[in-house]
Image (cartoon, rainbow, N blue to C red):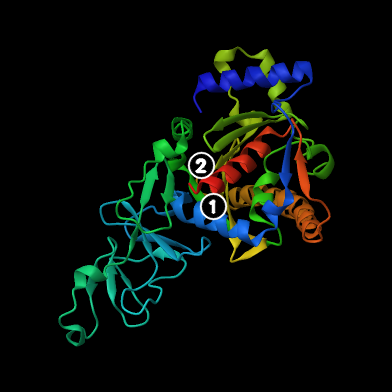
Amino acid sequence: MDHATQVRLTREVLAHLDARTTTLAPSIMYQATSVYDSPERLRQEKETLFRHYPLVMGLSSQLQGPGDFLTDDFTGVPIVVVRDGDGLVRAFLNGCQHRGARVVEGCGNTGRAFTCPYHAWNFDSTGKLVTISRGGNFEGMDKEVRSLVELPAKERDGLIWVVPTPNTDTKLDIDTHLAGLGAELANYGMSGYHHHETRVLQRKLNWKIVIDTFLEPYHFAFLHADTVGPIFFPNLCLFEAFGPHLRETLPRRTIETLRARPEAEWNLIPHTALVYVLFPNTVLVMQGDHVETWRVFPKADKVGECVMYLDFFVPEPATTESAWRHWDRNMDLTIRTVADEDFPVGEGIQSGLAARAQSDMVFGRNEPALAHFERSVTEAVATGR
């Protein structure tokens, strides 16, 4: 985030503090509870949002050198992402073009080639079929058409994006996709962050309820009274939309110390949590000393269940015991706050929806980011794009 934006947002926060106000939506919003509990709605979301939108797969540091790869199955599409010999990030369907076996599992470094564990067909990091074990048995087969099926992929400013549907005509234009947010994300220098830890969480609640959790501080003083509640101002946030994406600024109480400093010295980031939703399913949290990404997916065809990747990225690799303890404490606080406090409430909400306890939810004017996200999902599903 550039300094001019930091100054503008800091002024807005301080003005809200003086007036005891917060950013308000034009009106309250009513949301049908069926969007969290309808199998047909989930089918539409998966087809539109999780097949045809660019999705964040991770940060550049997870693929540091040639042959580094990661796999992902949470969209329902088996994906492998790899850095090729020229340093380019590529993505493929994780299926051998012989009999469809997965060519690789997990993450790591594949060296020069992926070797299918079933019959040892070899594919290089550009997806090309290089060698076939006992290849004489396949004489006459066109090897060129047996390459791994490529997916549109793009690395930009430390973020790796993939569209899970094969389409060789698709040019992944991240600048257009981000609707003006790209320059701000680039300013963070995320390509310099290092992957510290990944945790996979599964919960019995709709995937959107997980993202809703991040989009209002109205509940901080109540649900998080003994964790992050004392750190932040309750019921105070800034909100800005970038197409379907958004930025939510959650000020820490320490932001008051900036009043005594000239604007030229203002640094907003240590005094806030900056929450971005990279539509449709990634919550990126810029903290003062680290980056968190929450990638949230529906679990199979179960409308009331989801799975999440929580990734922690830090500015320098942890090489000492004290550094490991520091980041472990940060991770533990995150888990304790969200997984032990927010998600149990969300599971209770999901249980109530299943029991038809109410027909709609209401989003207050003090929850503008939440309303924007839910409206963006509804519009995307309605238009099919």
Amino acid marked by disc 1: His
| Residue at which label 2 appears | 315
- Residue 289 can be seen in this image: yes
Q: Secondary structure at mark 2?
A: loop
Give the crowd class for mark 2: few <14, some 14-19, many >=20 residues within 10 Å.
Answer: some
Q: What residue is at 82 percent from the left and 51 percent from the top? A: 358
| Residue at which label 1 appears | 196
Of residue 144 and residue 82, the one placed in the foreground of this image is 144
Image position, residue 13 (x, y; %) = 68, 22
Amino acid marked by disc 2: Pro
Q: Earlier in the sequence, mark 1 or mark 2?
A: 1
Give the crowd class for mark 1: few <14, some 14-19, many >=20 residues within 10 Å.
Answer: many
Image-based side of 100 in relation to 267, left or right: left
Q: Secondary structure at mark 1?
A: strand
Of residue 186 and residue 289, the one placed in the foreground of this image is 186
Q: Is residue 372 above or below residue 83?
A: above
Residue furthest toward the left?
140
Q: Quadrant of residue 9?
A: top right
Image position, residue 52 (x, y; %) = 45, 52
Image position, residue 342 (x, y; %) = 75, 50
Q: What residue is at 54 percent from the left and 50 percent from the top? A: 318
Image-based side of 129 in relation to 252, left or right: left
